[in-house]
Amino acid sequence: MQIICISCHSYGYGKELAEKLASELGYDHIAREDLADQATERGIPVGKLETAILKHQLITEELSIEIERFKAFITAEICKRTKKSGVVYHGRMGHMVLQGLPNVIRIRATSDEKERINRVMQRMNLNSKQAKNYIEQVDEDRCRYTKFFYNVDCNEPTLFDLVANSTNLSIENSVTALINLTKLPEFQPTPESNKKIEDLLLQSQCRLAIAEDARTRVAKVDVRAYQGNVSLTYLPAFVKQAEFIPQVLKKIENMRSLVCTMAATNILCIQERFNPDADTFNYLVEIAGKWNASVELVRLVHQMRDDKVLQKEEIDQAKFSDREKNGGILDDTSETEEDEKDKYGVPETINRLIQVGRAGAVNTIYGGVQPLANMVKSSKGNCLVVVGDVFLSSGSASQKRMKRDLISLLSDQSRVPVISSDDLKEQYLFGPKQRIKTLVFALISVLLFYFVFTNQELILKFLTPSDTEFKILAVLIIAFSVPLAAYVIGNLWHNILKLVKLE
Amino acid sequence: MGLEYFIDISWSTAAQVVMLGFIGGILSGFIGSGGAFFMTPGMMNLGVLGPVAVASNITHKFGKAMVGSKRHSELGNVDKKLSIFMLITAALGIRLAVMVMKFMFEGKEGHSAATSAGADLYISLVFVIVLTIVSISMLRDINKSRKKLDKGPSRKIVEFLSKHKLPPLIYFPVADISVSLWVVLIVGLACGYLAGTIGVGGFIGVPAMIYVFGASASVAAGSELYLAMYMGAFGAINYAFEGLVDIRLTLLLFIGSLFGIYIGAYGTKVVKEVSIRLVTAIIILLCVVSRFIAIPVYLQQLGIVDMDPANNVYFNFASKAMLYLSGISGGLLILFYVFKAYFHRRKIQASFSAEYPLTLKEKLAEENL
């Protein structure tokens, strides 16, 4: 079913718009406030979470688990209701609640500041200045809240499909325009999007179950579902709780398989097509093994509106639909080469990752570079982002340029290193270059110690002079030689540990 | 300064300094603070004069923090703005500490333990008082948080300061916190003074950033390392000017600590936050006890207490034993966690090849659930 998500500025007219639109379309209207009340009744400390975020308090491990629980609750509720009818959701983070789901209409409702101030003055009996301050404060709080939950700027325009401004457009006309928007092919539910909703529902139900069971509630886990198969990664510190996870998830319906991976961190691998036999994949698995990391596959569909791609997606959706009853990443039935090719190598690659115990999640990002950047920015727990084969439809030269630009953009958005798959081996594995470097560092270290310890008296005398000029010289020598020695010895140990695969 | 202030380094002494550096490095990588609380008194127990031990350690800290902050910076854990603001007064604090230390040394003649007894007593007293407060506060906080659902560090100071909003407030983007300039400057001064006096800056800087500023643990550790790099550089320059740096000790510390720091950092990935804080508090407390035991020796050397000098050897031995007990047991505990996690990982990896591709139903059937 169709999903429309509306977020608004404080005292915009989001609520009115959502109610009217839902009533005109005959859809179910869900307000964030109602979900927050239900979550509180269920035992999620929503009030405490809001206070902690808005008052700049430290978010403890316990609270961060409650945040995940709250997010999972909201997602599960929307997905559940979507199965029965179309849904209009309205809330302060409306545009972010179903992240990564295609075909969702994301609307920002707003009106100019003057109109909003007037509304506050009338409703709260404040003067103009007080009302302005109040609106600014609430907007700032909302942005902080969104930033905290999803690590995005709440006013980022690329996160919305349309902005409806009540200053120039009445609510009735906005509703008419939005009804027409819902008829566009881009926003129609497809077998692919339905499958994604099923996966999102499954994913959030699993997360909720883990957070609400006494045996597993403290465990920090990342749960992802792909075609009914759940992959779950947990930190080594929660190995005891993880043992109970299969029992806890036993009650979840529609789960076809469960893979639990212990991982200290996560590596994001962004490509258009995946190939488990490629060198890049082998390097990734080796690095993930060394770092105790899971590998998350992110497939980039960079031109969704492009006819060729759209056509391809439609073929893809049809194939997925056919396989709905009997297919999936752990399906035993044999598949033709063409089937595999049409799924961009994702199932084969994720299967191989499961085999080696490194499976993370699978994500598909539609719409190009900006949504990908938003996704990378908002994802947590990563230690490395690897950009592989992307922009395959472009020529070789422009492919290289676009890939370089993408890496640069992602580096700006991400707090972890972003590198090209071509540099993986050189930077993170122990190749001939590293062997030579290690030898050089070892040689310099030996020479340094030999020189210092065979000339102890001379060096100490030189470094403890009584004349001011020589004192300055001694200071300069220490100021330059100490960091150099730290650099050489540090790199020597780093390379040795890399060599013995203990990083 | 003359050469008589520096000790002879035998193979055995060198090995002990490397070991001190290794354990200090493990602790430093694990708990995010410099490990100086272990290395400074450890070198003093080997016969290194207090000011020389502090000077050599702070010079070692300069290089080590540079390597560490580079790695933290790659992970986005460094709030450079916060570190630079703290640095303004931290540099002042270090200079003050060096002046006090120099004053304690001036006027002394000859080379004997008694020459540096005043400075050693002063260093030990500051060490005992400051770190007792830090460790007891940590233990109290852990105890409180165990009783509550919320297991995070106390927020009382942050909440108190955020209520009063003493202007001007400065926003620090990476840590995502707003703190009064005056609070930042005062904390910077304290960090600098303690770094200059006992070579311990991280034990004040990291908790201050968490408990007073409200920064997250990872950003606090990264930013403190960045600050430590400058403080270490400033301290090293000051002490080098006074001729107190023993470059041989600094190099030996590097060998151990730059290896240990990688092992300790791995440990943080496999141990729960509350356990890390507990181990940290216990290790600090044991170090405090070690230094406390050594205080009567300095009092005797200064003639403040009437004690048979023959007993000094026992006090020194007990102090050294306690220090090694705390460092080695802490280091072994961390190594235990590291290897336990390593072998568990190997076991899980091995089990995958056997389990795959079991479905959930099959798994549950196997477990008779």
Image (cartoon, coloured by chain):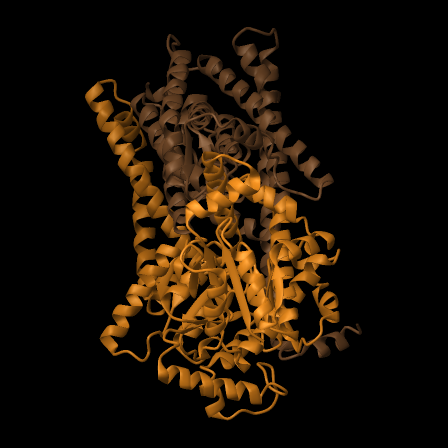
Q: How far across and how far down the image is residue B363, in percent? A: 71, 75
Q: Quadrant of residue A277?
A: bottom left
Q: Quarter of the image for the N terminus of chain A: give it.
A: bottom right
A100 lies left or right of B74 = right
Vertical order, B57 against B71 (above or below): above
Q: Residue furthest right?
A: B368
Name above or below for residue A383 compared with residue B113: below
Q: Is residue A430 visible?
A: no
Q: Which x, y percent locates residue A44? A: 69, 52
Residue A348 appears in view: yes
Chain A color in figure: orange
Q: Nearer the viewer, residue A77 or B202?
A: A77
Picture layout, residue A165 above or below residue B247: below
Q: Quadrant of residue B101?
A: top left
- Of the pair A344 and A161, the residue shown nearer to us: A161
At a point 57% along the width and 16% down the height, the residue shown is B297
Q: Nearer the viewer, residue B105 or B262?
A: B262
Q: Residue at x 55, y 39 (%)?
A: A55
* Colour chain B is painted in: brown
Q: Residue furthest left?
A: A469
Total of numbered circles in the picture?
0
Q: Position of residue A99 (x, y in %)?
A: 51, 65
- Whole-percent x, y for residue B329 in the image: 62, 40
Observer-nearest residue: A141 or A274?
A141
